[in-house]
Amino acid sequence: DYESDECMGQSWSGMATTSAVPRVVEVGETLLATLRWYVNTSAWKPSVAEFNFCLSLLPNEERERVLRYRLEDDRKRALVSRLLQRRCVAEVCQVPFSQVEILRTKGQKPFTTVQKPRDAPNFNFNVSHEGDYTALVSEPFCLCGVDVCAPQQLRRRQGASFKESIGVLQSQFAASEWSLIQGFSADQAAMEAAFQRLWSLKEAYIKARGDGLGFEPLSRAEFHFEGGEPWARAARVRVDGVEQRRWRFSLHPLAASHWVTVARGPPEAVVDAHGVFRGTFLKPSISDVEMQEHLLAPAPPFRELLVSELVPEELLQAYCAAAAADG
């Protein structure tokens, strides 16, 4: 049973101890606010009691948004996404889970108004979910965006090949990007992977900026992989023909042909119609030299978390009881 493993520290007799669940982030770490987390939401098979317990950790408005989804898998992704955000803010900003406040920009970029740590003056985060995984990234200085991409997500007409199916999206790619994708026309799997990685880069970029679908057409952002290697794990971008030297992109493979893409850029690039998110930055302007230092700073690898690690420690025993209630 997956959930018996999820209550970390739970013995074979069913007794659970909160001391066996380590903090997700240790205070004083150099990379305190630089997080790379993901949860395998497909593998999480909660009982009704367990799901409802996790749902109860959210404010009423957020609960309602989760329950608007009709499919169980979508509800799980939405719930885990919100738990990741709250756990992240609680850990980095050192506030109780119940006091975390999360708002959204007009472009639907989530952010918090909780006081930021001195060492993370522009602390911000982003989440994404698709296929098996839900992921979160956060950064102390740079804007950040994340996108999870899973295979075989593109809707196809019955009997249509992948190449035929993506034809309607050609206008969203720069000529060089489209040429790269079409270069794999003899190998449908490679073509899909190339398409997947480029599309994920675009998604991560607009999610970091905060304007989302307000950035159009997506072909304005032209991506180039490092060294011209189509399977490189780093990329740069030109926007309207101008190279954006203050942006960096990294691609990370996950299991089952999933990829997660991370975008990092300058705080000045934020698109925030109401200005509330921008107003939370303690260092809204960063010099080119300092920006390069942040972009070149090491980031931790992605770490897989269990749902139990998103639950406040003082509620872990109650969570484990709920998880076992229908088991």
Image (cartoon, rainbow, N blue to C red):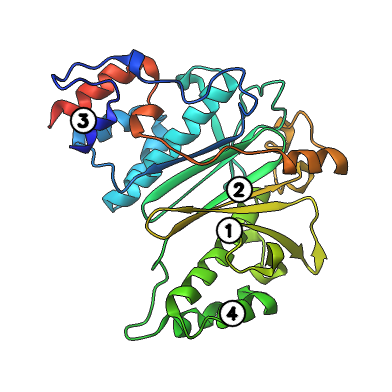
> Quadrant where the C terminus lies?
top left
Q: Is residue 35 above or below residue 198?
A: above
Residue linked to disc 1: 203
CA distance separating discs 1 and 4: 16 Å
Residue 120, picture quadrant: top right
Relative image position of residue 234 (x, y in whole percent): 65, 56
Nearest to N terminus: mark 1 or mark 4: 4
Q: What element carries label 2?
A: strand
Q: Which of label 3 and label 2 is nearer to you?
A: 3
Q: Can residue 315 be seen in this view?
A: yes
Residue 170: image location, x then y, percent = 59, 79
In the rendered structure, which amino acid carries the disc numbered 1?
Glu
Give the spatial CA distance, label 4 vs label 2. Answer: 23 Å
Residue placed at 61% from the left, 24% from the top? 114
State the residue in front, 98 or 155: 155
Q: Name the residue under label 2.
A: 145
- Amino acid under label 3? Ser
Q: Earlier in the sequence, mark 3 or mark 4?
A: 3
